[in-house]
Amino acid sequence: MIRLLIAAPSAVVRAGLEALAASHPAIDLVGSFADLSAAEPLRPDVVLAALPLEDLAPPVDGRAPPLVLLSGEAQPAWTQEAFALGVRALLPRDASAAEILAAVEAASSGLAVCDPRELEALLACAAPVQAAGDRSVVTARELDVLRMMAEGAANKTIAWKLGISEHTVKFHVASILGKLHAASRTEAVTIGIRKGLILL
């Protein structure tokens, strides 16, 4: 059985998803809530959510269950951000019942699902920077963030310029610090300059 938790602020949407879950013999609905606050104690195998990206948080120590997200958004940069936040299946709000159930099954099996029309652009966005030395560890999006860090931009400014949430900027900054083995933003910028990742 797949232990499923549903999260959506709309009671109407939750009711529809609950009925959908009840129609599948291999799904055990463990709860249905307006947000993700109850997810951890209930330990679902999969979370099916219709939430804005700002309500998601990066997985901690890989403990978060895979997330199937229903969203009206459909652009590669947004998709990349969603997958970075633990989403494993990204479907449009008008996805069919069969598509949603298939995505839940795929997520429970450790697979990722996204619209094939977005896949090529998503892979291009997520492709690491290919160059000499250690550049290959920094993704294109992280490089954008690092360049703005070098300009002295605050997280709020970076979020506005890239069209992502401030929370996700913090996630990217933490990733950059880890990949460059830096203890601070200033050190990360210094290392980035030394490695030729950014030019001033």
Image (tube, grey):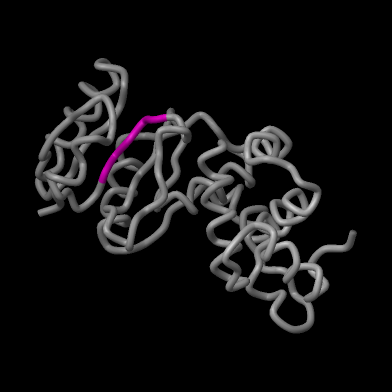
Task: Confirm whether the magenta stretch covers residue 48.
Answer: yes
Residue located 49% across and 46% down the image = 82
Left or right of 56, for residue 146: right
Characterize the magenta stretch by its predominant secondary structure. Answer: strand
Query: What segment is highlighted magenta in the picture?
Result: 47-51
Furthest toward the bottom, the residue is 133
Residue located 32% across and 35% down the image = 49
Q: What is the x, y in percent for residue 122?
A: 62, 54
Q: What is the x, y in percent for residue 189?
A: 73, 62
Closer to the camera in the image, 57 or 45: 57
Query: How many circles with numbers are drawn on the protein?
Result: 0
Residue located 35% across and 44% down the image = 68
Closer to the camera in the image, 180 or 31: 180
Q: What is the x, y in percent for residue 22?
A: 12, 35
Task: Confirm whether the magenta stretch covers residue 42.
Answer: no
Q: What is the x, y in percent for residue 179?
A: 58, 70
Closer to the camera in the image, 107 or 161: 161
What is the quadrant of residue 24 in the picture? top left
Left or right of 52, for residue 198: right
